[in-house]
Image (cartoon, rainbow, N blue to C red):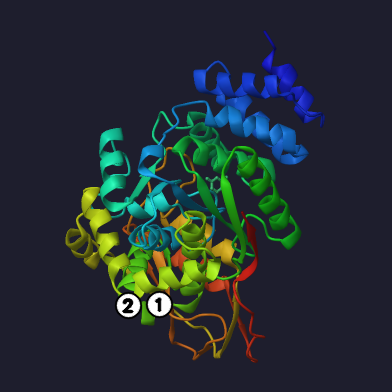
Amino acid sequence: MPIPAEILRKKRDGHALTSEEIQFLVDGIVAGTISHAQAAAFLMASCIRGLRSDETVALTMAMARSGVCYDWRELGYAVDKHSTGGVGDKLSLLVAPIAAAAGARVPMMSGRGLGHTGGTVDKLESIVGFSTALSNAHARAQLERLGVIMIAQSAEVAPADRILYSLRDETGTVESVGLITASIISKKIAEGANGLVLDVKVGRGAFMQQMEDARALAQMLVDVGRGAGLDVHVAVTDMNDPLGYAAGNWVEVLEAERALAEPSACPSDIEELTLHLSGAMLQLAGLATTLDEGIARARAVWHCGAAWERFHQLIAAQGGDWDGSRERYQHVPTFVLRSPQNGYIAGFATRTIGLALVELGAGRRRATDSVDPAAGVVFHCKRGDWCERGEPLATLYACASDRFDFVAEQIRSAIEFSSEPPVPRGGLILESFGS
Ligand code: URA
């Protein structure tokens, strides 16, 4: 029987682990025979030393097989979308109902907030009554009827990832190509996806701040995903500014719902990414022969109201009370942050905004913390807008109003001004490639 500390020393000293050693660690993490301290040491050593691609494949497969694996084959091709994490990234709330309304089967299993980034599950759970834990029978019936489920990872699905995900959040070991890849692909294998659209974020609000790191992550995701039998499409997308206007939990759900209801009023960044990602899902699912055709189909179901209707059917099917939610959040304390000067908005220190949101209660400092579903920020400006001194820059929402002063100061410091308009950026999709 291997000695865990010897394996950890080997990784610490920069040597590659064998697949048997990785399997031994993963089995022990799930069985509880490897302590959280040892698991955290493995994460830190992997983060600092890096994981080779054969180690990443071994970790991915061991994590995927650490629990049950769903199989939806009799319902047809299952396609999902996953993001590597951003700020204001509510795209899953749009692409899942759009793809389902266009005929795809979407068994979407998402995560909670990680580091400075938000998580789809935390957002969905801000909807009063909404359950992200469905029985197998419920999930299957809903997937058949509506073409979409949006769930959290249950205790049985990739339990190794569940444990390692929250330890990474607590120990500052998120930013690793190998660990991110194993986390995402293991869940997708276990969830029973056949096709996967990946949104690899790069920039000031992403885990990968440099293009070369994002490319390396994208390539590793494609290689490991395909090696595991998935069809994969990857888009590397700009995550320098918060997406849309809202970042947090309920505020993002509301922004997504409004965007589905009124496509003509949807912020252009959300629109561009939503159409690309849902179009790619339709192409992978064989519902479109080209990406452009997929985008056209996605746009059609969005603009005719079918996607908005599917969004509400999904919420009702998972126990959510939309009107009750709107009522609940109407009286949440708010704080208006005003512009300290005249000037153009030159940019955002988006990671700082994500961390400020954790401080406000929208995310967790420790895995056991609960989140405030009301916590969030709605900006009143985007990069390039002119702002007058005293004009509202952003509105903060949170149950704990005693945090407003501190968080408002952090957010104010993250909004950059200039006397000249900033150079416009091009589109948000920087690169895309796939099956
Ligand atoms: N999403 C995941 O599921 N895992 C990561 O590590 C990052 C984003």
- Give me the residue at 41% from left, 34% from top: 71
Q: Which residue is mark 1?
A: 266
Q: Quadrant of residue 254?
A: bottom left
The foreground one among 5 and 228 is 228
Secondary element at image label 1: loop
Secondary element at image label 2: loop
Q: Are marks 1 and 2 in contact (CB under 8 Å)?
A: yes
Instruction: Give the left or right position of residue 281, taking residue 306 as reference.
Output: right
Instruction: Give the left or right position of residue 395, taking residue 37 as reference.
Output: left
Cβ of mark 2 under 8 Å from ligand 1: the answer is: no
**For residue 2, above or below residue 381:** above
Question: Where residue 168 appears, x then y in whole percent?
Answer: 58, 39
Name the disc covering residue 262, or none. Answer: 2
Question: Where residue 420 appears, x then y in whole percent?
Answer: 65, 92
| Residue type for callout 2 | Glu
Question: Where residue 43 appears, x then y in whole percent?
Answer: 65, 34
The foreground one among 424 and 105 is 105
| Residue type for callout 1 | Cys
Q: Tell me the crowding category of disc 1: few under 14, some 14 to 19, or many 20 or more residues within 10 angstroms, Cα based.
A: some
Instruction: Give the left or right position of residue 239, taking residue 78 as reference.
Output: right
